[in-house]
Image: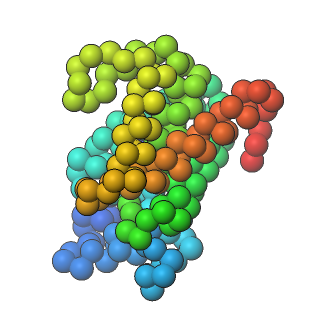
Amino acid sequence: MNLVIINVLVFLIQLLFDGKEGAVTGKLALWPVDSGEFKPYQLVTHMFTHGGFAHILFNMFALWSFGTWLEKVWGPKKFLFFYLACGFTAAAAQLLFSNAPAVGASGAIMGLFAAFAYLFPNAQLIMFPIPVPVKAKWAIAIMAAIDLFGGVNPTGSNIAHFAHLGGLIMGFILVIYWNKTNKKTFY
């Protein structure tokens, strides 16, 4: 999957060139509009930039897990459009509801998760760290509730809860629209 390769390459560039100033990460991260650091290209670049090894590992595992299925259903062009639309909407939600900078593919991943849960609601998933299978339709509801709670009750965890919710909402909107209209293209 090409998106995984791109994310890993960007992460390697971050590791090689960030140094103490975090120059690469700082340029690619999504900054609040009024921060003086915001650039429009960050609406896209933030989703290819990650904050550490565990961050990229979990995101790329989820991208591979859900993305492989969705790319088979939609094909590569439609899948790429979907992924970028969810990531872009995640960025918009982050800018609207948070004053913190953000990095990561998590918003786009939540959109993939939403689409997967819609298309395969009874698929059994293991939600780390709980080793009990959960149907996708319940897993997405749990994740949405956690993000909604985390968004309205911030704990300083550096998790972009509203970005997650933005990606999730766009994911549901697109997959429901495509499913109801049987659209073959939307790009």
Image quarter of residue 46:
bottom left
Above or below, 41 relative to 180: below
Number of residue marks: 0
The structure residue drawn at horizontal position 72% and vertical position 27%, both measured from the top left corner, is 179
Residue closest to the eye, 123 or 27: 123
| Relative side of 144 to 175, left or right | left
Give the residue at the far bottom of this rendering: 36
The structure residue drawn at horizontal position 61% and vertical position 50%, both measured from the top left corner, is 85
Tell me the colour scheme of the image.
rainbow
Give the residue at the far front of this rendering: 153
Q: Give percent across and percent down for residue 149.
A: 37, 45
Above or below, 156 relative to 31: above
Q: Residue 3: in sight, yes or no?
A: no
Above or below, 43 relative to 52: below
Q: Give percent across and percent down for residue 147.
A: 39, 45
Give the residue at the far left of this rendering: 20
Q: Residue 120: in sight, yes or no?
A: yes
The structure residue drawn at horizontal position 39% and vertical position 63%, both measured from the top left corner, is 102
Residue closest to the eye, 119 or 149: 149
The structure residue drawn at horizontal position 44% and vertical position 38%, both measured from the top left corner, is 144
Q: Give percent across and percent down for residue 38.
A: 48, 78
